[in-house]
Amino acid sequence: MVTPQRRERIAQIHRDLEQYSYYELLNIDASAAADDVRQAFHRMALGLHPDRYQAAADPALQQQVYAIYKRITEGYRVLMEPQLRREYDEALQQGQRRLVKTEREKTVPQRKSDSIANPQARKYFTMAQEAERQGDKKKAKLYYKFAADLGGEDPVIKARLEALQEG
Amino acid sequence: MDTPAVGIDLGTSNSVIAVVQGDQATVVPDGAGRRTHPSIISFHPNGTVLAGYAARDRRTIDPVNTIFSAKRMIGRPFRSREVQAMAKRVPYKIVEGENQQPLIVARNQQHTVAEISSYVLRYVATLATQHVGAPLEHAVITVPANFDDAQREATRVAGRVAGLNVLRILNEPTAAALAYGYGRGLSTRIAVYDFGGGTFDITILQLNEQVFEVLSTAGDTFLGGDDVDEQIVNQMIEQFVRQHRIDLRFNSSAVARLRGVAEQLKCQLSESAIAVAQVQEVAYGETGQPLDLEFQIAMQQLNTLAGDLVRRTFLICDEALRLANLTATQIDDVVLVGGMTRMPLVRDSVAKYFGRPPRTDINPDEVVAVGAAIQAAILTYGELEPGEEEAAPGPQSVLLDVVPRALGIGVVGGFTETIIRRNAQIPLEQTRRFTTSQDGQTTVRLQICQGEARMFEENQALGELVLEDLPPAARGELQVAVTFEIDTNGLLQVSAVDQRTGRVQKVHVRLIGAASEEQIEALRVKHQELPAPV
């Protein structure tokens, strides 16, 4: 049985999760050595690993425990790796509680084929584009036709095929 | 959850099922008292599906309808190295199905690999049901530690199709460690050396009383005892050519018989220095006279044949130790798992490598299923007892496992960008932000893979991550935060949020070679109506 006190404590950690530094979450000093970090991680895991609550049949509690434990593994990973720990200690000085990668977002290029739903049609469409680039119009047309057959009424394929037939 | 929970070691060659009753984990025997069950399924002409030893007996009589080593293909697309290698060497037929799924053809019917595995699972579950005298639903199923997402997912599907509630997909070495240390309150560092029929894994764990933490794991999903059998079969074929000038390579039923004999010889050589086989009527001569094979092999010869394979395992051990920042001598105890570890050459080599003899008091064939059953019991009944604030005491143990392979996405130039590094503690999450490059772009597709190689091509492609129905916006304006999560089963989950609006975006992962949800459900329903394999 999960006692009401324990339930309340978990709810409270979950509510304040963003306020905890990794050190506070693992309940250790900022100077703790790797072995102490590991010991603390084991102590926390005994109390808060999601497996410990699997039989509780309480989705709300399980969801809270899961969220807390994921933050614990994150802290453990960062604090056990010297380079990451240095970066974290600096970030913590700036008031950040988590080590979030501040690198610029990745821009995802859009390919024409991305909107085609059928994966087989998409494959032939890409092959047709490749053939077109190599100047093999006959092959390109054939592949576009395959793509059109598989992709139903896909407008992107249709437009490409028509353009090729006109040219 | 009233019914007892079971642990199933779904092996490449053999499967084992264990059940916890009272405080004792018991391995369930078949009607003849045998405790390991061949992971073989045979489709009989009369419509019956045979499993275990009954199916093994049909390997030589009916090789094209008798399916073995299916685990080597689970979660792998048809065009993968693994499936292509299998297609070359097994007598049954494998064809390509929808979404690159390999399909096995037997008696004019197509079966997915997960379906074949589900028959094995149902067979052992039926044995356990008879043993316990009550229906079973909840199961922990084990997989090699270095199985990737697609392989784990397909194994879970097999469990579902077999009508089981899969409590957990658990790593075999972690299960073995639990069986080794459960209830003993040990504080020690161990290595689990797992050399089975189809795969090799090495896992380093730190035991801290009730806590079992995986420090590192490494392995090869295409290295196992089957490969040794294959080498012996090749020797037999050469011998037959010398004796009778007949090449048996294209005679699938003869090769199937020789494979069975090779496996027996290999096992005999764990006990004696020389093994002899007389195989009668392997083929027929020009005038129809039966031709026999006389073959003998010495332990020395076997060691030469297996030497390279065994040496390869220690390169993988080097890797695991390096990942854990340890040396071989810092390991306190070595636990052996898998039939190959019965080979004296393997035991001697392990002793030499770690500088200490491995444990020999643990049954290497049964330890994984026993550990899985213990974990099943913990997950089923392991309610917390009132206690201290941080540490919830109780007799249970907690397994802290890792993700075996790095998870990455394909980026410009054919490279991989790692999102989640290998051997990180699970469950875990990592969030990355992505923006669009075109005005009005409404779809984003990312190729995802597992593996550590820099080039995307060299890693195992899992499939693609699809973000659909994005709100049209000027390029660069739309920012989507994609969270990659590895759950307690080691399975990938993804979620995405539009950063500006906080709106949850539709996102899904399309696995190559996987069945669709509808297909799985249809299979589950279909299989519930079929009689269990016998």
Image (cartoon, grey):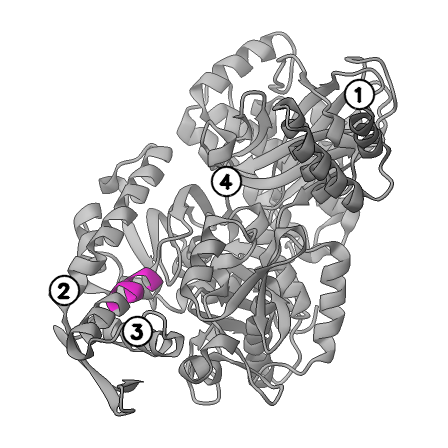
Q: Report the Cα–Cα distance between label 2 and label 4.
A: 47 Å
Q: Nearer the viewer, residue B363 or B443?
A: B443
Mark with earlier residue (1, 3) = 3
Residue for badge 4: A42
Q: Are marks 2 and 4 in contact (CB under 8 Å)?
A: no
Q: Nearer the viewer, residue B471 or B105?
A: B105
Residue for badge 1: B499
Helix, strand, or loop for circle 3? Answer: loop
Q: Are marks 1 and 4 in contact (CB under 8 Å)?
A: no
Give the image quarter of residue A107. top right
To the question of a shared chain for discs 2 and 4, the answer is no
Front position among marks 3 and 4: 3
- The stretch in magenta equals B226-232
Q: Report the Cα–Cα distance between label 1 and label 4.
A: 35 Å
Q: Nearer the viewer, residue A160 or B380?
A: A160
Q: Are there few (<14), some (14-19), or many (20+) residues within 10 Å of tag 1?
A: some
Rendered location of residue B296, percent (x, y): 15, 76
Front position among marks 1 and 3: 3
To the question of a shared chain for discs 1 and 3, the answer is yes
Q: Report the Cα–Cα distance between label 2 and label 1.
A: 64 Å
Rendered location of residue B96, percent (x, y): 60, 57
Amino acid type shown at disc 4: His
Q: Are marks 1 and 3 in contact (CB under 8 Å)?
A: no
Left or right, B272 with respect to B164, comes to left
Residue for badge 3: B248
Left or right, B159 with respect to A38, comes to right
Mark with earlier residue (2, 1) = 2
Q: Report the Cα–Cα distance between label 1 and label 3.
A: 65 Å
